[in-house]
Amino acid sequence: MRANSLAAREIVSALSEAMPSIAHLWARVYDALAVVPRLTTEISRSRAESAALRRRYADLVAAGRATLGAARDAESDPLYYLRDELRTQGHLPPDPWGRS
């Protein structure tokens, strides 16, 4: 994407020189293209952050379902699954044995 943006800016520069009567318009296009690399970086960062959040959410949902299943099956500590995931995500302090 960055290479395409750079190529487009080079083309706009050449067109600006070839058509000086509308150089002010080419300058606006050039300035708009200059923002593309920054926007590309921001989109990539946002996508990665969104994927991480979706993964954390899915892990919490799975822990909640496991907790409900454990309660239904009368396990001795059905909340273990939820506590474990909450600890893993940093929402609870480490357990008394020092595990995170």
Image (cartoon, grey):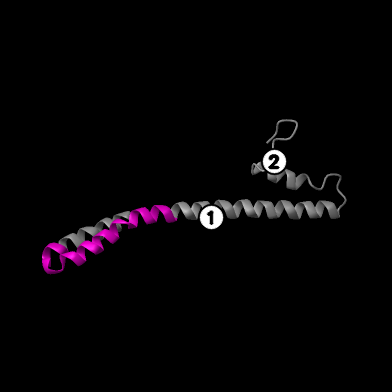
- Residue of label 2: 92
Residue 62 in percent (x, y) is at 70, 54
- Would you say 76 lies left or right of 14 here? right
Q: Is residue 1 visible?
A: no
Predominant secondary structure, magenta span? helix
- What's under tag 2, amino acid-wise? Leu
The disc label shown at residue 73, or none: none
Determine whether 96 is above or below 39 in the image. Answer: above
Type of amino acid under label 1: Ser
Viewport quadrant of the N terminus: bottom left
Q: Position of residue 55 (x, y in %)?
A: 60, 52
Q: Is residue 56 visible?
A: yes
Question: Quarter-wise, where is residue 80 in the image?
Answer: top right
> Badge 2 local density, few (<14 within 10 Å), some, or many (20+)?
few
Quarter-of-image position of residue 36: bottom left
Residue sitting at x 79%, y 47%: 79
Quadrant of the snapshot with the C terminus = top right
Q: Residue at x 18, y 65 (%)?
A: 24
Q: Residues within 10 Å of mark 1 (few under 14, many from 20)?
A: few
Q: Nearer the viewer, mark 2 or mark 1?
A: 2
Q: Nearer the viewer, residue 87 or 65?
A: 87
Of the numbered discs 2 and 1, the one sitting upstream in the chain is: 1
Residue 78 higher or lower than 96, as above or below: below
Residue 55 in the magenta stretch? The answer is: no
Magenta region, residue range: 15-43
Q: Residue at x 15, y 68 (%)?
A: 22
Tell me, yes or no, whether the highlighted magenta stretch contains residue 21.
yes
What residue does disc 1 label? 50
